Image (spheres, rainbow, N blue to C red):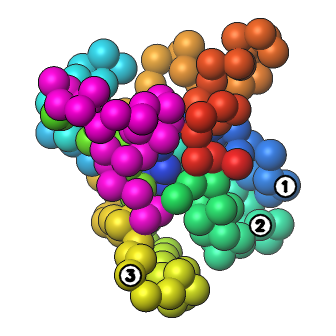
Amino acid sequence: MQKATFAAGCFWGVEDAFRKIGGVLSTRVGYIGGLLENPGYIKVLSGKTGHAEAVEVTFDPSIVTFDELLATFWSIHDPTLTHRELVMSLWNIHDPSTLDNLPNAVSHYRSSIFYHNDDQKSKSIKSMEKMERSLGRGKRILTEIVPVTTFYQAEEEHQQYAEKNTAKDKVNMCSLKNCPIK
């Protein structure tokens, strides 16, 4: 068994995408890459902790490879968006000035690969370079590829959110509407 950790916007939709892959044994959503120990959802949303909303994926590499997980990661979001653009897309905001009073409230939605070993680091970099070449001129991947740090599991109500909530509740779920997650 191996672990992979990804951030690609709101963790509800990201987790849902990875849970559908054969060979993924478990997932958990949480917070990573910040300064505060044991942050909670509200603190992370404030943008003052530096954490990203992320998904830790436990997978069986004999069934699904890390490269296949990377392919899913690239397919579920637009890695060329800045934090602000990603939030605007997630929340269906058309006027950028709407976020002017919330300057820090976008940093938790970002595109990141948190590698667990040198092999994951190498594959992530190669995958990103390939993806960037496919974009053509003028477009750049903004995904950060960084070593995994302490992963703080999010509150229970955020775990397997898509599976726990009814179709009516999902109308407002970021992975189903107004979100770059397909």
Q: Locate the N terminus by quadrant.
A: bottom right
Residue behind mark 2:
64
Above/below status of 54 relative to 117: above
- Near-viewer residue (148 or 100): 100
Q: Which residues are magenta?
A: 79-102
Residue behind mark 1:
22
- Near-viewer residue (177 or 108): 177
Give the left or right position of residue 71, taking residue 36 as reference: right
Q: Earlier in the sequence, mark 3 or mark 1?
A: 1
Instruction: State the SS at label 2.
Output: loop
Q: Earlier in the sequence, mark 2 or mark 1?
A: 1
Q: CA distance from mark 3 to mark 2?
A: 33 Å
Question: Residue 7: x, y in percent?
Answer: 46, 50
Question: Residue 89: x, y in percent?
Answer: 48, 41
Q: Residue at x 46, y 17 (%)?
A: 155
Task: Determine contact: label 3, label 1, CB under 8 Å.
Answer: no
Give the left or right position of residue 32, taking residue 25 as reference: left
Instruction: State the SS at label 3.
Output: loop
Question: Residue 130: x, y in percent?
Answer: 54, 87
Q: CA distance from mark 3 to mark 1?
A: 36 Å
Whether residue 37 is visible here, answered yes or no, is no
Residue type at tag 2 = Val
Mark toward the viewer: 3 or 1: 3
Task: Determine contact: label 2, label 1, CB under 8 Å.
Answer: yes
Is residue 97 part of the magenta span, yes or no? yes
Q: CA distance from mark 2 to mark 1?
A: 7 Å
Per the rendering, the mark at residue 69 is none
Question: Residue 137: x, y in percent?
Answer: 43, 88
Residue type at tag 1 = Gly
Residue behind mark 3:
138
